[in-house]
């Protein structure tokens, strides 16, 4: 359940700012459900934002724990962050760290269609590098591609000072 951000003044609602975080973060922490235990795995990602609706693409090996878990329970939660700068203070309480982050939840889908796998890999490479890449059917065939249909997300930042 999305309970809303406690420190409302740190919430980000401006879409340009949210896109800037998604472009910069590069690493997504994917939360999965393993029976009655959480499982979190860091991964690189690509994203699309269309009419405020976010779709995330991930890629990886053709087998492993995360794939097994999402086949059983496709519900996922994710987090990505950037602008991490620790700062000092006179007392322990004045120390801190700046950040900007996005969190959200959605449903993971293991993509089987080759055309969509190629699209997902192109999206991933664009987010990671800022460049357009040609992806062949052969390249798409040796990896798994996961699409996250994001149902909702929030963004937050702690600036310096
Ligand atoms: C910055 C970063 C970016 C990454 N980007 C990608 C990516 O884009 N795609 C991708 O597939 N993988 C990526 N990885 C590796 C990823 O975190 C996993 O190791 C990998 O995806 C295998 O996950 P799995 O659930 O299939 O684990 P399995 O290989 O099935 O792992 C079995 C066990 O190994 C341990 N384990 C797995 N991964 C890690 C880990 N990262 N650190 C410590 N212990 C671990 C866990 O205890 C897990 O239960 C990235 C890792 C980092 C740190």
Image (cartoon, rainbow, N blue to C red):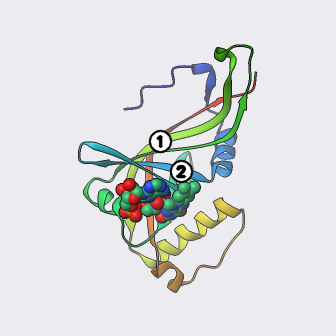
Q: Say if 43 sits above or below 31 in the image.
A: below
Q: Is mark 2 on a helix, strand or loop?
A: strand
Q: Do the residues labelled 2 and 1 touch (CB within 8 Å)?
A: no
Q: Distance between the residues labelled 2 and 1?
A: 11 Å
In-image side of 101 versus 161 (left or right): left
Q: Percent from the top left, x then y, of residue 6? A: 51, 20
Q: Quadrant of the C terminus?
A: top right
Q: Report if the beta carbon of the residue with label 1 is closer than 8 angstroms to ligand 1.
A: no
Q: Which residue sits at x=48%, y=77%?
A: 115
Residue at image point 40% right, 73% down = 62
Question: Which residue is tagged 2?
Answer: 28
Tell me where residue 82 appears, x and y as whole percent.
66, 42
Q: Where is residue 149 in the image (x, y as percent from the top left)?
A: 43, 53
Please tell me whether mark 1 sits on a helix, a strand or a loop.
strand
Q: Does residue 32 appear anywhere in the picture?
A: yes
The residue identified by callout 1 is 104
Q: Quadrant of the N terminus?
A: top left
Q: Residues within 10 Å of mark 2 (few under 14, many from 20)?
A: many
Residue at the limit of the structure toward the front, as seen here: 91
Could you tell me if residue 147 is visible in this image? no
Q: Name which residue lies at 55% across and 70% down.
A: 121
The quarter holding residue 100 reads top right
Residue 11 location in percent, x, y? 60, 27
Q: Examine the rendered structure and indicate whether residue 130 appears above or below residue 11.
A: below
């Amino acid at each position: 359940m999305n309970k809303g951000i406690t420190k409302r003044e740190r919430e980000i609602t401006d879409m340009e700012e949210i896109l800037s975080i998604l472009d910069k973060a590069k690493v997504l922490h994917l939360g999965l459900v393993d029976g009655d235990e959480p499982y979190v795995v860091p991964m690189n990602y690509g994203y699309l934002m269309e009419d405020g609706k976010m779709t995330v693409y991930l890629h990886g090996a053709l087998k492993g724990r995360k794939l097994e878990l999402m086949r059983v329970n496709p519900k996922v939660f994710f987090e990505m962050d950037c602008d991490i700068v620790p700062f000092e203070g006179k007392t322990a309480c004045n120390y801190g760290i700046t950040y900007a982050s996005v969190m959200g939840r959605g449903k993971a889908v293991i993509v089987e269609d080759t055309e969509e796998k190629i699209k997902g890999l192109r999206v991933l490479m664009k987010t990671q590098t800022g460049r357009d890449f040609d992806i062949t059917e052969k390249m798409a065939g040796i990896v798994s591609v996961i699409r996250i249909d994001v149902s909702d997300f929030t963004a937050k930042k702690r600036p310096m000072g």
